[in-house]
Amino acid sequence: MLERAGHPENTIPKPSLSGLPLESRRSFLGVLLALGSFFVGALLSVPLIRFALFPLLRRTTEVKNSPVGELGEFSSLTEPVMRTIQIEQVDGWRKAISEKAVYVTKDSQGQLRVLTSICPHLGCTVPWNKEKNQFVCLCHGATFTADGTRVSGPSLRGMDMLETSVQDGRLQVRFQYFRQLVSDKEVIG
């Protein structure tokens, strides 16, 4: 190796076309590449983070009231009456309308109650049996009184009562789904 004026050749900074030493230009490019890689990685990780956190951030569709009928229709109830209500569900940009069966009945004080027709045991539809004067689940034999109280069978609780309100003389119901196979009424949707 040749030395010039007492300096080894590899310690002399090499001139570049821009006038900056070659090492400082390489370190600048390395820093620029590292920052660019960081920002691209952060940008690409946003969908993954959003996907992982979606269940926590998701907002369910708002539960709206559905009309059941005029109050006068239910003034002289002697047994539960089945009504079909329409439920509007909005999922993103998709709107779906489904129909659900509910029963309008009176409790022991004569107040109107609306019961869901879904069995709290395993989710079967529970019809009203006029001969037995009870609700009887055809799937597993659970029986309920006219006001939804559990009589017998594998169900751990009575039929689920829905929230009601009266608007302009019409009975309105707020349909909800409840967890099955548990003894306490727990809303799931």
Image (cartoon, rainbow, N blue to C red):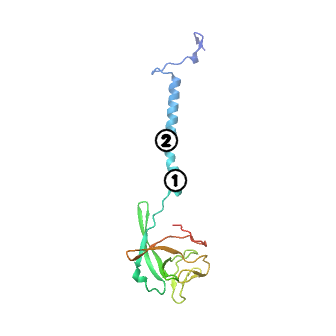
Question: Residue 121 has which mark?
Answer: none
Residue 52, percent across and down?
Answer: 54, 53
Residue 74, percent across and down?
Answer: 43, 83
Query: How many residues crowd around disc 2 within 10 Å: few (fewer than 14), some, or many (20 or more)?
Result: few
Location of residue 131 with respect to 122 vertically, above or below:
below
Q: Quadrant of the N terminus?
A: top right
| Residue 87 in sight from this viewpoint | no
Which amino acid, by three-letter code, is at mark 2?
Val
In-front residue for pair 72/184? 72
Residue 175, percent across and down?
Answer: 47, 71
Query: How many residues crowd around disc 1 within 10 Å: few (fewer than 14), some, or many (20 or more)?
Result: few
Q: Earlier in the sequence, mark 2 or mark 1?
A: 2
Which of the 4 quarters of the picture holds residue 181?
Answer: bottom right
In-front residue for pair 158/84? 158
Question: Residue 51 has which mark?
Answer: 1
Q: Residue at x 50, y 34 (%)?
A: 33
Location of residue 128 with respect to 32 vertically, above or below:
below
In-front residue for pair 15/86? 86
Location of residue 96 with respect to 138 vertically, above or below:
above
Q: In terms of secondary structure, where does tag 2 sit? A: helix
Residue position for label 2: 40
Which amino acid, by three-letter code, is at mark 1?
Phe
Residue 105, percent across and down?
Answer: 48, 82
- Classify residue 80 as left or right of residue 139: left
Q: Residue at x 51, y 52 (%)?
A: 50
